[in-house]
Image: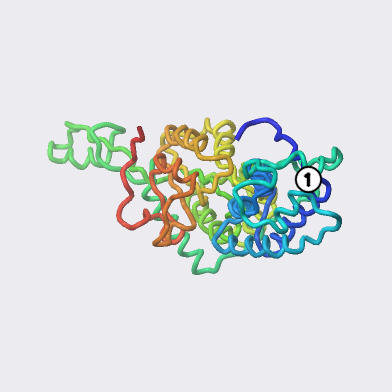
């Protein structure tokens, strides 16, 4: 997707109202449609045009639906609304296509499908030009509702977080082990000196065993993750609770640190403190853009001992190539990259989304919140990959 402000979409006044009505109908069907999804829908219409009903339906499916159930709801809303769009006035050519025309490969003027017939279309109204992707005060609230997890689910998340902390420990703990290098171990040296009449003939040394983890959690709170937010927040809270130095960032179309709302708070108070902070990050998912912002603003704090945990379903609005570059930069600066996908526990799960396909070579461990922190399929975590 190119940078800069998007070009205006020359929809007529009536069609503008009807497209807005269609989005309202989709929301009324129970599909969470944020500003990012609206932008993707309008960008898709600009690419395929409005003279092919099947193409418009497919754009609606791809950009507005975030689950198989959403696909069904979007299809039903599409059929119901464009059978009776609740609009007044004589429809334009594009509107008549959506209302009546069966799927076809060509427009009425012989132009290929996907390109509007500009000779017969209604001329754009300069006062009602729709700029795709611009903020509108009429956009729906992206408020998130965090429902506290049950005690059993929270205990399970805490147990998994403790296992993960031990597996990813890279910083010195309280325990020591013998080592040829390191600080002198006075207790062992004195005990062994008894054999030589109390003379310290040999100095024994020790070094601390890695017992603490250095964690950074990047938590996806976009619209596609809304149905999983409550369960995943229990995991995010557990990672912060068992490791006080953990830092937590929430992202969607922007990224911000929410560590302060979680630290030193009981679970239910943390739920209430975090919930209002998530509103600005509703809508679409721009993982690559948020990773770039994280690297730019907080990347200097990443160390070779840091493990980064990304909690996301992998739906990327901007495409995967930029995400692959950002993941490679992140991978090169930390100890491990762990990706927690809410769907990974499903036996039929496959990392087939564009974002996960591009990011997969840079993921050390792909797991789910259900069997966290075990890798998908069981067994031990794989060795750190070496992408070409």
* Other residues around mark 1 within 10 Å, as few (<14) / some (14–19) / many (≥20): few
**Residue 305, picture quadrant:** top left
Q: Which residue is mark 1?
A: 136
Quarter of the picture containing the C terminus is: top left
Which residue is depicted at the point 39% across and 48% down?
Answer: 365
- Tally of marks: 1
Q: Nearer the viewer, residue 205 or 301?
A: 301
**Is residue 171 visible in the rendered structure shown here?**
no
Q: Nearer the viewer, residue 126 or 120?
A: 120
Which residue is depicted at the point 60% across and 56% down?
Answer: 65
| 330 with respect to 374 (left or right) | right
Quarter of the picture containing the N terminus is: top right
What is the image's colouring? rainbow
Where is residue 231 drawn, in percent x and y? Answer: 54, 61
Q: Secondary structure at mark 1?
A: loop
Where is residue 195 drawn, in percent x and y? Answer: 13, 40
Where is residue 181 drawn, in percent x and y? Answer: 26, 31
Which residue is depicted at the point 75% across and 43% down?
Answer: 135
């Amino acid at each position: 997707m190119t940078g800069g402000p998007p070009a205006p979409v020359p929809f007529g006044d009536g069609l503008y109202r009807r497209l807005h009505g269609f989005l309202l109908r989709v929301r009324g069907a129970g599909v969470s449609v944020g500003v990012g999804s609206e932008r993707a829908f309008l960008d898709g219409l600009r690419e395929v045009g409005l003279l092919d009903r099947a193409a418009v339906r497919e754009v609606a499916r791809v950009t507005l639906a975030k689950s198989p159930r959403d696909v069904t709801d979007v299809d039903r809303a599409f059929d119901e609304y464009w059978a009776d769009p609740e609009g007044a006035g004589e429809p334009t050519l594009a509107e008549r296509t959506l209302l009546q025309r069966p799927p076809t490969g060509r427009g009425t003027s012989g132009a290929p499908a996907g390109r509007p017939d500009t000779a017969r279309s209604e001329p754009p109204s300069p006062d009602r030009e729709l700029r795709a992707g611009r903020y509108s005060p009429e956009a729906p609230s992206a408020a998130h509702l965090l429902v506290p997890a049950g005690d059993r689910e929270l205990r399970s998340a805490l147990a998994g977080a403790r296992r993960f902390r031990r597996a990813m420990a890279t910083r010195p703990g309280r325990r020591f082990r013998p080592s040829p290098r390191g600080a002198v171990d006075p207790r062992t040296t004195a005990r062994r000196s008894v054999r030589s009449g109390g003379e310290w003939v040999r100095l024994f040394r020790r070094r601390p065993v890695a017992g603490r983890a250095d964690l950074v959690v990047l938590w996806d709170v976009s619209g596609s993750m809304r149905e999983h937010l409550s369960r995943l927040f229990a995991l995010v809270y557990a990672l912060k609770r068992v490791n006080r130095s953990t830092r937590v960032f929430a992202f969607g179309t922007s990224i911000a640190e929410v560590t302060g709302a979680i630290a030193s708070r009981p679970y239910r108070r943390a739920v209430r403190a975090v919930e209002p902070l998530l509103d600005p990050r509703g809508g679409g998912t721009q993982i690559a853009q948020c990773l770039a912002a994280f690297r730019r603003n907080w990347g200097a704090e990443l160390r070779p001992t840091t493990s980064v945990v990304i909690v996301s379903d992998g739906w990327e609005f901007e495409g995967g190539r930029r995400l692959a570059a950002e993941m490679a930069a992140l991978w090169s600066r930390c100890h491990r990259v762990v990706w927690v996908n809410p769907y990974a526990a499903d036996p039929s799960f496959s990392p087939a989304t564009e974002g996960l396909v591009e990011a997969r070579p840079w993921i050390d461990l792909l797991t789910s919140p259900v069997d966290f922190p075990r890798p998908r399929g069981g067994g031990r975590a794989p060795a750190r990959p070496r992408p070409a």
